[in-house]
Amino acid sequence: MRLEIELTESGGSGPAPELPPVQAKPRQRRIDGFELSVLVAFSAVSVFVLAIDLWRVVFNGAVWTGTDGVYIVDQMQYLAWIKDASHHFLSSNLFVLRDTPSDYFQPAVVISGGLTALGMAPWLSLLLWKPVAVLAMFFGVRAYAQRSVTGVWPRRVVLVLALFFGSFTLVYGSWSVLGDLFPGFLSWGYTFGLMALAAMVFALVAYEDARGSGRRLWLPGLLGALASLLHPWNGELLIALVVAAELVMLTSRRYGRDHVRLTALTIGGTGVPLLYYAILGKADINWKLAQLASKHVFSFWSIALAVVPLLLPAIVAYVKRPTTFLAAATRTWPLAAFGIFLLSGTSLGATPLHAFQGITLPLAVLAVEGFQLLGWRRLPRPVLIGAVAVALFTIPTTLKELSIAHTLAAPTPGNANFIKRDERNAIEYLAHNKAPGSVMTRSYLGAAVPGRTGRKTYVGDCLWSEPGCLTLTANAQWLFVQEPGGQPTAAEARSFVMNSGARFLLADCETTSDIPRLLGPLVRSTHSFGCAAVYEVQ
């Protein structure tokens, strides 16, 4: 911010020519009690699933595998990447038995892999990112709010709505809430995604500052590169926002030659990791298959219905022409998210809900601006009315999110977030056995084997155990679980195991087949752990 000081003499109007312009830095406001309470609440939500997991461990004697989320497929994959990075720096796909290249670089995975190489458990080296993600998201939203709206209470409203807003909508035919629109949901096992979102928000703030000061032009691109590496959807969105916002500024003649370098550095820094992911998807069949396996469709109207309470007042704000880059980015964010949502339905994308992660931030800013334009202050007791309205659109849905998480994180059959003690002992045997070799087991434990042992598994989940994941799952079920009319003969079982290339068979506590009888001389050694067992085969 540039401050011109003028001195007048005897009522004269000319500026004093001998005084140079003074540069005044914006005063950094310390976090106040209200903001601290919001941070505490956001932190409490972020550790909710972890807390109930640890409660079950301490008071119910449950055996926890270290997952910190309600859908463990991704968390098990993160653990596998970390375990593999602890040996090779770069990660490969451990959820198939074929050879796969170690070609995946992700900075947080590499750091966690280094900690694991030093002796830390993979699940702990992953959990260490949770406080980083929570703090980064909170302070990113806070910085964005401070630069977008004026006044203490408007900024507080933006902060609360951005972190806790939610409304009920139809989700696959049921009246529920959308987790991806709720930043607290990302903290439940998706800390890389939450950190990427925070990096993107900070990149927008840094771009606004660099645009005005002409300093640290490299910072937005660096933050954008971090966002892209952690979660490429956020990098795509950042590039879209920078381009769209600067086009808006160009139409109002607020974009000049002095801004070109900043734009180029930001797009270039953010785009290089995206190019790496594009090459990875073409050069590594595992990534291409995972992208295809993750493709699905989602109703746009479910998302629209969920954000309607913010969207309606936000529309009013569009009558006000943006005069700053951040204001333009805020207005283009919802449109850019919709564009990426449409892109996810093509061969270039997947996982459509990722496009709308963080959408509550720009909508909260625009909604506050909209209410200000409508004359909210003229209402009697506007602060009280505003507090009640904010509470109605944050507390009920937050409680609903917590209730759903409590249900989904509970120990259930076939879900490896909690396993039997004997199964854990069998996995630990494989982790400490020095003999190399991959593992065949049912998908139930197959999801946990790579992250706990560093070994490849025959089948784990239907994102990375491709192609033919469902067939692989059925094959493992056919071998380990005796079903009427579906039990393999000894010859069939031996041929199947020999052709698989697995060295170890891990029988979980639901195994009903007589593996030693089926495999006969193929079994070189048997190690029993109560209801679980490990068989080494030729």
Image (tube, helix red, strand yellow):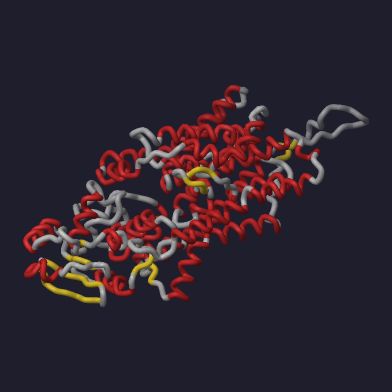
Q: Is residue 17 above or below residue 99?
A: above
| Residue 14 image offset from top left, x and y in percent | 83, 27
**Camera-nearest residue between 51 and 230:** 51
**279 to 416, vertically: above or below:** above
Q: Residue furthest front?
A: 484
Quarter of image, res 363 = top right
Determine whether 158 is above or below 340 in the image: below
Instruction: Residue at 84% x, 34% y: name it.
Output: 7
Total label count?
Answer: 0
For the residue pair 231 and 468, the one nearer the viewer reads as 468
- Tell me what residue is drawn at x 46 percent, y 35 percent: 267
Quarter of the image containing the C terminus?
Answer: bottom left
Q: Position of residue 133 (x, y in %)?
A: 51, 55
Place of residue 511 in the rendered image (x, y in percent of width and height, measured from the top left): 23, 67
Residue 110 in view of the camera: no
In percent of the image, x 66 and y 51: which residue is there? 391
Q: Would you identify the image quadrant in which residue 443 lies?
A: bottom left
Instruction: Confirm whether residue 364 shows in the render.
Output: yes
Where is residue 17? Give x, y as percent: 79, 31
The quadrant of the picture occupied by the N terminus is top right
Please name whichever residue, 233 or 526, is drawn nearer the observer in this view of the structure: 526
Q: Residue at x 49, y 49 (%)?
A: 179
Q: Nearer the viewer, residue 303 or 260?
A: 303
The answer to whether 269 appears left or right of 430 in the picture is right
